[in-house]
Amino acid sequence: MNESWISLVPRGPGNNDTMLWSGTAWYDASTGLKINLGQWTHVVFTVNNGTAKVYINGVQKFSGTGFPNVFTNENGVFGIGVNYWDTPYKGLVDELKLYNKALTAQQVAADFAIGNTVTLDLAAKSLKIGENVTLTANRSVTWSSSNDAVAAVDTNGLVTAVSIGTAVITAASIADTTQKATATITVTEPLTVFDETDGLLVKLDFNGNVNDSSGNNKNAEIKNNRVEYVAGRSADNQAAQFLKAESGAAFDNIPVKLPDNLIAGDQAYTVAAWVKWNGSSESWTQAWSSIYFSDTFVAADSPLNYYLNVGLSGTNQLFIGRPAAASSNQLPAQEWAHLAMTVVPNGKTTLYLNGIQIAQADSDIRTTQGFNEHFIGGNFWDQNFNGALDEFRMYGKALTSDEVLILAEAAN
């Protein structure tokens, strides 16, 4: 066994300091410190013509001359974690590098900085109150928040949104606390909890009939056989395909009629459905066709008479009528799209496509006199809507924009 050796030890003889030592021509290159237990430490030693240097976390902690010339031939043996005599090393080793030259102090510092730089998988994130996200660092770090009242972070990088505001989450390297990375967390309003049955007046699934599935027994009726059932949005379900008005007044050909007086005259409400438009043609023009139509009738030619229309304009863009609000959006042909309208008396009437607002106007005043009617697929004057409808809903309240979006996304 060769008695000429060098050994880098986390705890050496004497003061138990981290050191490089050699025998049997004894040489102690003590760093004067003890590397921390349970933490990663960057350790480097160099030997150049008898000059030995030891670096801890990029900083030189020992320099001395007269280090023994151990490797006099090509038969040297390298071992990691063990030697011929002592208790094996109890710990971890990573990113071991061996050079055929002595690195300079600048090169050692640069290697430490590169290896110790902290990076995060996210630089910024927006959360709603109650949401959370787990940040991931590229090395062992400690976590902290600039404002725990806005966004708190645990020891695993799990960030929880607490209140509205902005907080900066900092990840500091355990090996070198000067090495840090940050992520900015912006916290907004809490998640909307939406009970899709709350306020639901009517729900038509069109599975072979126009019966109400809300439990309120508000069954609709088909007029003049202007409905046929086709494949719905999901497997094993059906949808209502509206048929062209062929004879008689347009009123007599409106495909579906809901019960009268579903709402009070001054009541806020919402209609929503999935729509699949077949497009427009010369034989079946879609100008001013209605997807949903409602009126309040008081008397012939009464100025109190009211109507509200959701459909296609003269150029086939989606619009609402009375109040008049046109959008620049057109329904995609041969695709299912989610359409919703909210009505707030003395407020706004708003139209949404796939959960996104596309038109809005001041609401007209609906009288509390007379009776209100609600129709699907047509109106009193124009050709029927050429398309299919599925999952029609009517609420006795105006859904919020978040609720409309949730309804569209949940249904999708």
Image: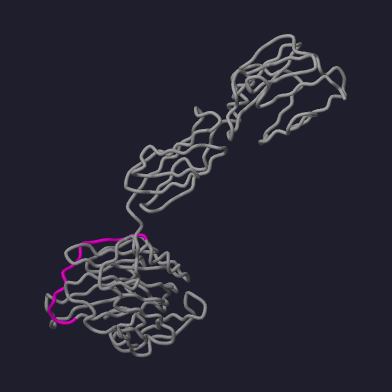
Give the quadrant of the C terminus.
Answer: bottom left
Quadrant hosting residue 347: bottom left
Whether 363 is among the magenta residues is yes
148 w.r.t. 279: above or below = above
124 w.r.t. 276: above or below = above
Whether 347 is among the magenta residues is no
- Residue reaching furthest to the front: 14
Q: Residue at x 79, y 14 (%)?
A: 25
Residue closer to the observer: 28 or 275 = 28
Residue 333 pos. (x, y %):
45, 69
Residue closer to the observer: 125 or 138 = 138
Q: Residue 23 vs residue 233: left or right?
A: right
Q: Residue 6 vs residue 279: left or right?
A: right
Residue 322 pos. (x, y %):
22, 69
Q: Residue at x 40, y 44 (%)?
A: 152
Q: Residue at x 42, y 66 (%)?
A: 410
Range shown magenta: 356-371
Residue 356 pos. (x, y %):
36, 60
Residue closer to the observer: 178 or 230 = 178
Q: Residue 301 vs residue 158: left or right?
A: left
329 w.r.t. 273: above or below = above
Q: Residue at x 37, y 40 (%)?
A: 167
